[in-house]
Amino acid sequence: MKPGQLFVSTMRGFPRHMFLATCLVCLLFSSSLTHAQVDRFAALRQHMVTTVVEGDGIQNPLVLDAMRTVPRHEFVSGTLRGRAYEDTALPIGSKQTISPPYIVAYMTETIDPQPTDKVLEIGTGSGYQAAVLAQIVKEVYSIEIVSTLAKSATKRLEDLGYDNVHVRDGDGYLGWPEHAPFDKVIVTCSPEDVPQPLIDQLADGGLMIIPKGERYQQSFYLLKKEDGKLKEQKLVPTLFVPMTGASEQQRRIQPDANNPSLVNSDFEYDANEDGKVDGWHYQRQVEMLTDQPMRGAYCLRFKNQQIGELSQALQGCAVNGRTVGALDFSVWARLESVVSGPGVSDQAALVVHFYDSVRREVGTQIITRWRGTSNWQQSRRRIPVPPTTRELIIRIGLNGASGTLDIDDLQLVPQAR
């Protein structure tokens, strides 16, 4: 017996007016639940925009409105909906992730989207970036090389009513020539160099944002096409997950997973002089500081006045857990009024996250935590590497704690298994 049949059978013998009243109560209760759920997600979206997107410098009103409108929870699995509005990447299957909200907003704002634009997106993924674009521009053409993701994104976007998004299953680096030229191009996977078809299909005067570089050392670049030639501007460091397909395997420079190492771990370099330390991505409330560093000319300062807001920097590298059994870390820190918050992530710390070949997290190690006030002090620790590890992410900073934390001379030394 189906639930509806059971309900009707149990109501037989009730007076008709009581039956109708009961049905009305059920309908109102169901409606109130749905409305409450909608309100809950709307409030989470608003908080995300206020604290993460607008709070970290995104100003374009069209982008802010799109981030407030697009239901990000619809683009992640049911088990992750509760985390949909956190400022973090989340797995969507096939070794891929949905980009953090700030990265989506940053990429969108950088290309200065206009209501008349036709935009090409390379790397559909979940479809979230395409949906944000679709709130602003006239047409979005999006290409995804992973067939299962292309199919699921197509259905999701159709179900949500994004009729101006067109998804294609194929190699994004070949572009979509029959719909070219495009006013703007967003590339959400990271090649070593800009694919020529994308240059050819960008309209004159058009803009492209693309993360490129080595596997674990990427930066965003803004490209503008003028008289058939590209003008290139290097932006902030970033890190996108490995690409699927031949392009990833054919990189000229491959990471050495048997000898993991950090880049610019003494925080001395800022090649494009943008005030952001090179080699570290997703920097939040971070600055390069010349005030009495422990080593060299600079240290890295993390400063946060509000508990719960992010102050951090991240770096990834390849590591083969079959050959690397442990990692030795050392780091210098100087503190002023560092106070932890109530949450697990509201602590100033150096944290290492380990991932396997399909980017599942297989372990987390806290190298050291900081609180209070102190002059320069060094922390050291050896941590084991899970055998299934294939890459790691180092997260350093106040995270969600408040106060001021200065970091210098971070060292990592691998130990053979």
Image (spheres, rainbow, N blue to C red):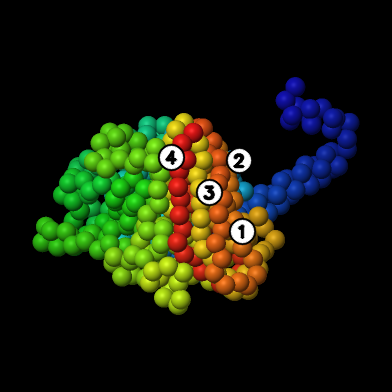
Of pointers 2 and 1, the one earlier in the residue sequence: 2
Instruction: Give, as a three-letter code, the residue at label 3.
Output: Val
The CA distance from mark 2 to mark 1 is 30 Å
Instruction: Give, as a three-letter code, the residue at label 1.
Output: Arg
**Closer-to-camera residue (184/276):** 276
The residue under the point 70% across, 61% down is 342
Q: According to the image, label 2 marks what residue?
A: 79
Q: According to the image, label 3 marks what residue?
A: 352
x, y percent for residue 159: 48, 42
Mark identifier at residue 319: 4
Mark 3–mark 4 CB contact (< 8 Å): no
The CA distance from mark 2 to mark 3 is 24 Å
| Secondary structure of the residue carrying numbered label 3 | strand
The CA distance from mark 1 to mark 4 is 24 Å
Q: According to the image, label 1 marks what residue?
A: 369
The answer to whether 19 appears left or right of 49 in the picture is right
Does residue 272 show up? yes
Of pointers 4 and 2, the one earlier in the residue sequence: 2
Of pointers 1 and 4, the one earlier in the residue sequence: 4
x, y percent for residue 343: 67, 58
| Secondary structure of the residue carrying numbered label 2 | helix
| Secondary structure of the residue carrying numbered label 4 | loop
Q: Quadrant of residue 339?
A: bottom right
Mark 1–mark 4 CB contact (< 8 Å): no
Q: In this view, does 239 lie above or below 278?
A: above
